[in-house]
Image (cartoon, rainbow, N blue to C red):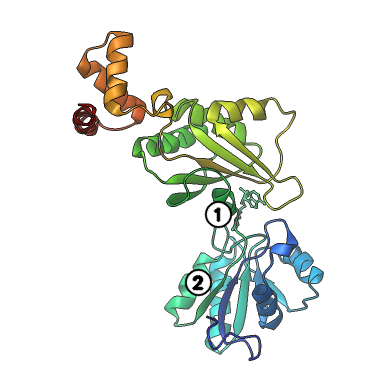
Amino acid sequence: MVPENDTPDIPLAPGLYLVATPIGNLEDITLRALRVLRSVDRIACEDTRQTAKLLSHFGISTPTVSYHLHNEQSRSSELIETLRTGGRIAIVSDAGMPGIADPGATIATDAIAAGITVYPIPGANAALSALIASGLPSESFTFHGFLPSKEGQRRSTLEALRSRQEKATHIFYETPHRILGALEDIVATFGPLQRITLARELTKLHEEFLRGTAAELLATLSARPSVRGEMVLLIDGILTTETSEKGLSLADEVQALIKTQNLSEKDALKQVAKNRGIGKSEAYREFQRSSLRRR
Ligand code: SAM
C-alpha cells in the first residue's frame, strides 16, 4: 500500500526523507528514490561532490547542502528549522542507507522530537546484501558496524562475542588494510574452524563472496598480492568446533574426550565448555540433557 500522501500524482508531502542510494550499481536506485530526490527542496549529502555524480547521472538538479560527521549537529538544527516551516528535505549518504555507519541518525531523532514526519526510502545496504547471500543463518543477526581498529580492542570485542554463543550471525564492515588482522584475530578467538563469509565489492563488476573457515579465508587472502575493495565480514554466531562440525552432541563430545585424551568426566566437561564458549553450569545442564537423550 502506498501512503495516500506519497503517490506519484500529488506533490511530495512536507517532511524528512532518508533516501538509500546504490552501493556500487546505479541500477539499484529505486523509482521512488528518484522521484523524492527530484521533488524535495534540498538534498543534504554526506559529500556533495559524490552525490553530484549520482544526481547528474539521473538528470536531477535539486540543490544540495553538506551534512556530515563534522557539521551533523549544527546542520541538523538548521535543517529542522526549514522542516518546521513545511520544507521537504532528503538525506543521502555516499552510498547505501543514511544512518547505517553513516550520518543520518541525529537528524532523524531531532526531526521526530520536533514532530516532523520522517519517511524511510528503502534501498541498497551492504550489511543486509552480504547477509542474505552469505550462506550463514539470516533469521537472526547483529550488525556491529566497524570492528575496533586497535588490535587489543578488536580481540576483546571478538572474545566477548565468542563467549555469547548466539544463534545470530555477526556482521561487520571492514577495510582492506585491516582485514588480515581481523581474520588473524578471529582465528585466535573463535578458532580456525569458525564459519565465516567475506563479501567484497557487492553489486559491482568484481563482486566476490569468500565462504569457508576463518583459517581458509586467512590463507586465501594472505596469498593475494593485495586485498582491495569494500567489504563486509560475517561470522557465524555459534562456535564451529571439530566435533560440532561432525554433529556430535555435548555428551558425545565429553565421551570422546574421556576416551581419546584420558580425561576425567569433570575435566572433559570443563574442556567442552571452553571449546563451546559456554559456562560450566550451562555445560553441565546440557550434558545431563544430552546424556538422557543417548540412553
Ligand atoms: N551506509 C552504508 C550502507 O548502508 O551499507 C554503509 C556505509 S559505511 C561508511 C561504508 C562501509 O560499508 C565500507 O567500508 C564497507 O565495509 C561497506 N560497504 C559499502 N559498500 C559496499 C560494497 N559495495 N561491498 C561491500 N561492502 C560495502
Instruction: Answer with the quarter of the image where residue 227 lies.
Output: top right
- Foreground label between 1 and 2: 1
The amino acid pointed to by label 1 is Leu
Instruction: Compare residues 86 and 188 and report the one nearer the observer.
Output: 188
Instruction: Compare residues 180 and 26 and report the one nearer the observer.
Output: 26
The x, y position of residue 90, in whole percent, is 62, 75
Instruction: Specify which label sits upstream in the sequence, 1 or 2.
Output: 2
The x, y position of residue 143, in whole percent, is 48, 51
Q: What element carries label 2?
A: helix
Most extreme residue toward the bottom is 10
Q: Is mark 1 on a helix, strand or loop?
A: helix
Classed neighbour count for the residue bearing mark 1: other residues with Cα under 10 Å, few (<14), some (14–19), many (≥20): some
Left or right, residue 21 beside residue 283: right
Residue 128: assigned label: 1
The amino acid pointed to by label 2 is Ala
Could you tell me how far apart the alpha carbons at marks 1 and 2 are, in whole angstroms? 21 Å
Q: Is residue 177 above or below residue 4?
A: above
